[in-house]
Amino acid sequence: MQRLTRQRNAVFSAFSDAGRVLTAPQILAHAREIVPEISLSTVYRQVSLLLADGEIAKVELPGEPARYEVACKPAAHGQPGHGDSHADHHHHYFHCSSCGQVYLLHSCPGPMDDLAPKGFQVKSHEVTLHGICASCAGAETTGKGRAGKSH
Amino acid sequence: MQRLTRQRNAVFSAFSDAGRVLTAPQILAHAREIVPEISLSTVYRQVSLLLADGEIAKVELPGEPARYEVACKPAAHGQPGHGDSHADHHHHYFHCSSCGQVYLLHSCPGPMDDLAPKGFQVKSHEVTLHGICASCAGAETTGKGRAGKSH
DNA sequence: CTACGTGCAAAAAGTTTGCAATCGC
DNA sequence: GCGATTGCAAACTTTTTGCACGTAG
């Protein structure tokens, strides 16, 4: 059985703290605010456990490191309250090219089996949107917003 | 200016040979049939050059290593003259979970700007389909196929 | 007390880079 | 000959793993 260590709590609360889609180093940074001596290995190990438990989900976008999000939880920038029971928790993502932040999308363009040639069995699909998020779009006139990684 | 080395030719012909979406190690394997002493570094370097030339395009799918495909642009080695900037030819991909092969899709579900919350500027989108390709679906009874990576 | 969890270091996988030798032009 | 290109090894990034110690239960 899993033990209730400070590190496990720190990793998990990193998500509630940030409420967003985080990379492993970002989780580490947040967790270190609670348990400064936590190591990246432990982050990865706890993430694996949380994944196996279904408490978080892995978010993989083309060309970037894996991120993780709290599973089946209301989105960070949306308001909770919808009784969205997890039937098939497949969602899609928006990647801001300005701040690097990944946002959850709740809608889905629907089945796109027609895109595949005949004879191909489509099991699932992933959609990634790229562009400028509302924060960055709004910040471009007001000056600097809350960008962090413009590499 | 770029020199016409055997390695460059080997890397480029790896694509015509395979005619598919290839990972760097796959390019290496094909290129080694022509120039056995070619190294992976050279493959990466030539791939970078070909990318810069617009002769090939990088294909990044969630959770896997980068692949490369011959670009849709017709002129291969000729001089482009002027003004031919790469248009917005985006396509999508089908990833076979059985053989690992990546297939190009020609159709596109259309603009999906509506998926993003208001205030978000959608610049582009990517769609990845997962499932069983026609070869693997057909091979499931005969047991042949060309599977390789079932990890 | 005992087994699971942790930190560190090293490894694995994919990609890039420094450097001396090579080879196109 | 000059300098771009190559092969090798080493660095780098992201993630995993081996091992000895620490700690929850």
Image (cartoon, coloured by chain):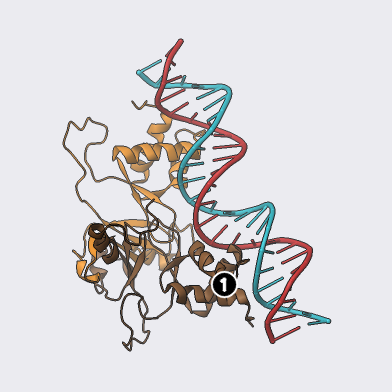
Chain colours: A brown, B orange, C cyan, D red
Point out residue A134 in the picture as x, y percentages from the top left corner: 26, 66
Residue A49 falls left or right of residue B7: right
Q: Quadrant of the N terminus of chain A?
A: bottom right
Q: Is residue B120 visible?
A: yes
Q: Is residue B151 visible?
A: no
Residue A8 falls left or right of residue B54: right
Q: In this picture, is A12 found above or below B74?
A: below
Point out residue D7 in the picture as x, y percentages from the top left corner: 54, 32
Q: How many marks?
A: 1
Residue found 24% across the figure and 54% down from its top: B90
Q: In this picture, is C23 found above or below B118?
A: above
Q: In this picture, is B40 found above or below A83?
A: above
Point out residue B62 in the picture as x, y percentages from the top left corner: 39, 61
Residue found 25% across the figure and 69% down from its top: B116
The disc numbered 1 marks a residue on which chain? A
| Residue that extends furthest to the front in the rendered view of this protein | A142
Point out residue A66 in the picture as x, y percentages from the top left corner: 45, 63
- In front here: A34 or A127? A34
Mark 1, secondary structure of its residue: loop
Q: In this picture, is A123 found above or below A80?
A: above
In which quarter of the view is residue C12 placed?
bottom right
Residue, disc 1: A34
| Residue that extends furthest to the left in the rendered view of this protein | B83
In which quarter of the view is residue A133 placed?
bottom left
In which quarter of the view is residue B137 placed?
bottom left
Check disc 1 and give the amino acid type.
Answer: Ile
